[in-house]
Amino acid sequence: TSVEDKDYATTSALLQRGVGVLPHETDRPYLQLTLLNPSTKEELVKTWYTKPLGLTFSPSAPIKVKKVDKGTRAWELGVKEGMEIKLVAHTDMPTPVDIYAKKYDEVMDIIKTGMGRLAGTP
């Protein structure tokens, strides 16, 4: 895909989507969430290799981060309350899935499946 006539925002978004599907560490299971920062409209890709995630989600769609536990991986990654889940990928599903068209329970099942392969305690 050419970016020759594209503006910066379009080019940046295209690169972010491309990076999101690059191969991950093949020897470690992972869970990847693409989160939308509501204040900046920036999409941030965050990856976990261990659990717990350190997040609590809102109980309805659109699924937002309700709480970030201090000192956890989510906290280290800079995840903030109010961020919205946009895409989910994991070891068994490496192509990110757009969750906006999915029901809450379907999204949570995808996340739980990805978490199931992570090292650490539930």
Image (spheres, rainbow, N blue to C red):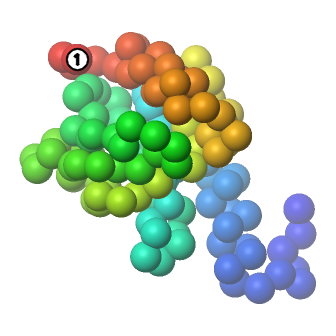
Vertical order, 46 against 30 (above or below): below
Vertical order, 83 against 99 (above or below): below
Q: Can you give x and y, in whole percent of width and height, for residue 48 in the image?
A: 36, 36
Q: Can you give x and y, in whole percent of width and height, for residue 72 in the image?
A: 16, 42
Can the viewer see residue 20? yes
Q: Nearer the viewer, residue 82 or 53?
A: 82
Q: Can you give x and y, in whole percent of width and height, for residue 98 in the image?
A: 67, 42
Q: Is residue 14 found left or right of 61 in the rendered image?
A: right
Helix, strand or loop status at disc 1: loop
| Residue drawn 23% across the image and 49% down it | 67
Q: Nearer the viewer, residue 17 or 34?
A: 34
Q: Is residue 18 found left or right of 76 in the rendered image?
A: right
| Residue drawn 53% across the image and 72% down it | 41
Vertical order, 77 against 25 (above or below): below
Tell how many labels: 1
Quarter occupied by residue 56: top left
Quarter occupied by residue 96: top right
* Quarter the C terminus occupies: top left
Q: Is residue 84 found left or right of 66 in the rendered image?
A: right
| Residue type marked 1 | Pro
Q: Nearer the viewer, residue 11 or 64?
A: 64
Vertical order, 116 against 101 (above or below): above
Can the viewer see residue 27? no
The crowd level at tag 1 (other Cα within 10 Å; few <14, some 14-19, many 20+) is few
| Residue drawn 29% across the image and 59% down it | 80
| Residue drawn 43% across the image and 76% down it | 39
Quarter occupied by residue 7: bottom right
Q: Which residue is mark 1?
A: 122
Q: Can you give x and y, in whole percent of width and height, for residue 118 in the image?
A: 34, 20
